[in-house]
Image: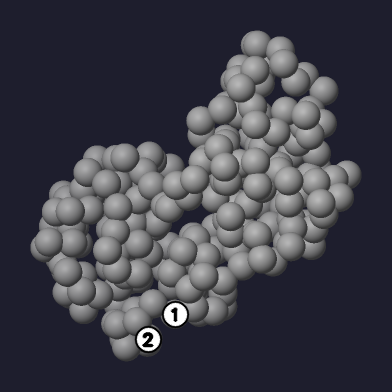
Amino acid sequence: MHTTDEIREITNRLVHEYPDRRPLLDYTTPYQLLISVILSAQTTDAQVNQVTPILFTRYPTPGDLAGADQADVEAIIHATGFFRSKAKHIIAAAAAIHGRFGDAVPRSMGELTSIPGLGRKGANVIQGVVFGMPSIAVDTHLMRVSRRIGLVSAKDPVRIERELKAIVPESIQTDFSMSINRHGRYCCYARSPDCSRCAIRRMCEWPQKGRRAEPAEP
C-alpha cells in the first residue's frame, strides 16, 4: 500500500508528464460538457467531438434541446453509437436542467446523478472540471492504472472511488484523477503497457511490470 507522500509523488510525476489535464471533450459551457459526457459512453471522445458542434449549433441551450425532436437528435448523434437511447437521455437531461435547475448545471452529487444518463463518473467530471471540487472519475483507464500500481484491489467502480477518496488527499484528487486517466490512455495500455517510459514505474507494484504481451485488464 502506498503512503500519502508516495501518492503525492505519483500525482506530481504524472502532472509533470501530462500538464494538459483538461477534458478531451470539446465544450464551452457546463451544459455542453454535461451533454458531451453522456454522449461519450461506449465511444471515443473524438467521435463525440465530431457531432457536438452540429448538436449545439442546432440546440444551443438546455431549453432548445429539451424541446427537440428525438429523430432529429438521433440523426445528429448517430455516429456515437446507441444513438436512440443517447438521444432520449440527452433530451431528458436537458429537460431536467431547464425545468428543475433553471438552466444551470447543478453541483451536488445527488442532483447530478438524478439527471438522466449521467452516472457517478460523469458527475465527478462535472464536479471537478466545472466547480473545482475534489473528484475522482472512475473510468476504465483509472480503474486499470490504480489497480496495477497497487492503490486499490477492488473491481467495482463505486468501491474504487470510495477507496481512492480515502487515501488520496482532497487537494490533489482532481489532478490525480485526470493524470491517471491520461497515463492509462497514453502509456499504461490495457495490452502491452509501455513500462520503459513510465513516469511512475519505480512506484508500480504490478507483478508483470516490464513484460510486453500481457492480457487485457478491465
Q: Residue at x 65, y 11 (%)?
A: 212
Tell me where residue 51 appears, x and y as whole percent: 21, 48
Number of numbered discs present?
A: 2
Say which amino acid is labelled 2.
Phe
Q: Residue at x 61, y 22 (%)?
A: 197
Tell me where residue 12 appears, x and y as whole percent: 65, 47
Say which amino acid is labelled 1.
Pro
Q: Which residue is mark 2?
A: 101
Q: Residue at x 29, y 59 (%)?
A: 27
Q: Choose between 172 and 43: the one closer to the eye.
A: 172
Tell me where residue 14 appears, x and y as whole percent: 61, 41
- Asked whether residue 71 appears in the rendered view, the answer is no
Q: Is residue 147 shown above or below 102?
A: above
Q: Which residue is mark 1?
A: 106
Query: What colour-coding does the image apply?
Result: one colour
Place residue 172 in its image quadrant.
bottom right
Mark 1 neighbour density, 10 Å: few (under 14) some (14–19) many (20 or more): many
Place residue 43 in its image quadrant.
top left
